[in-house]
Image (cartoon, helix red, strand yellow):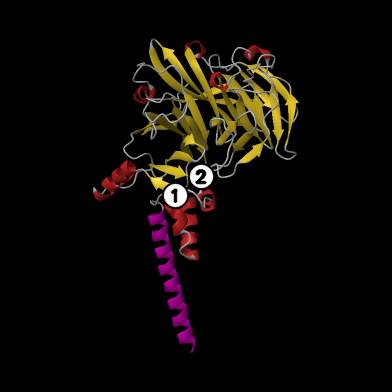
Amino acid sequence: MASNRENQQAAMEEEGKQFEFHADELENILSHVPLVDLVSASRVSKSWGDAVSSSLRHHSPPRPWLILHAHAATAHAYDPRSGLWIKISQPVKTYAAGGLRSSHSSFVYMLSSSRFSFSSDPLNLDWHHADPPLVWRQDPIVARVGDFVVVAGGGCDFGDEPLAVEIYDLKTRAWRFCDSMPGNIRDSPASSWLSIAVAAEKLIVAEKSSGQMHSFDPETNSWCGPFDLRIGEAKSIIDYSIGCSNNSLIVVALCRIKNVERVKIWRGVGDEFECEEIGEMPLEYVAKLKSDSLGECNSINVRVGGNIVYVYSDMWNVEEVVACELVGGGGCRWWSVRNAVAREKTAERLVCTCAEVGIDELQRANNVRFEYLVRDLQQRMSRRTSGSSYPTFAIGASEQVTDVPSG
């Protein structure tokens, strides 16, 4: 009798080992499957759902998407985990009559004289609608900071304060006026002249031409600054952009040194944003940001999510976006990806967001249609049939690691 129990126990242990082996293999296979397809895979059974979760945790975690918006119902998203562009189509809804805009991160909005509509979730599935701000604005900066939506600058009507700031409280669903933007940015109160980020529950505003920054705390309704970025190459910088990575300020600047355009990245440290250099974009990638018609790069924009910085031009004829992964321990990993909507001018200007999209967000997208772009699928299948493994970064894109500069 004891012998039978021992045999049964041994058989169960052996079966368990086989299951673990097969589970490991399944997780490894799933690590090569695009994130969108993992939604259906996770619904096959509980064991498959567990395998999907484990694969995303341990083998190939989601990475921030770059999303290019044509309008509120259609967008193209680049998923660096799979190296694919995905067309995202949502049911048409009733939004404000104004054009789609975004000042930073995953926040998008539309503003008209009768309505203010905005969305801040990664895939912009949920939209909120409110009365418009009291001051009519043409091109303000708009950002969500905690439980508040801050609308600043952009006042255009005669008699309105161009630097006026209003806050929409998401809890009370009411607007209130705050201290106006600092007077020393009076000449550039529009979003096209400013770059913004949200860090530590504060709005950070940088003037793109000078790099001078201010911070705004919606809890106290107060501004601090100005802060001058302490960067050695400041005299050679012609354009500043900022973002936030894991609650740290990231500064990306376009420099012109001896008539050569260069792009560098710094991390802002401390309350006065003293800058530590992280890395420099290889010149071959800087060239990809230049306009065909101008032959040069006069300005850049950035979107930051997690540890990835996307650098792009809002010129419609620039066909590449450059990405930078901030490597743990210092340094940068660079690559480029084609702009899926280049030369397809469907809006006044390119509207970009960056969002950390995971399996949970995709599972919520019940009425959303995802389509892979045919060209990307062909490239992916070509690599598969040739025997090469799926790359971690963009299909057909080169990579380069830049260490932290010494000294």
Region of the chain picked out in magenta, as a range = 1-30
Image quadrant assignment for residue 19? bottom left
Q: Nearer the viewer, residue 103 or 279?
A: 103
| Residue 117 versus residue 20 in the image, above or below | above
Residue placed farthest to the bottom in the image? 1
Report x, y in % for residue 113: 64, 28
- Say what secondary structure mark 1 lies in: helix
Percent from the top left, x then y, of residue 333?
41, 33
Left or right of 167 on screen, residue 16:
left
Q: Is residue 60 visible?
A: no
Which amino acid does the dot numbered 1 rest on? Leu
Name the disc covering residue 35, or none.
1
- Is the residue 214 above or below the residue 28 in the image? above
Residue at x 46% of width, y 44% of height: 89
Coordinates of residue 53 in the picture (x, y in percent): 50, 55
Residue 173: assigned label? none
Q: Is residue 386 left or right of residue 55?
A: left
* Residue receiving disc 2: 357
How many numbered marks are there?
2
Instruction: Bin the neighbour count of mark 2 within 10 Å (Cα to Cα): few under 14, some 14-19, many 20 and up.
Output: many
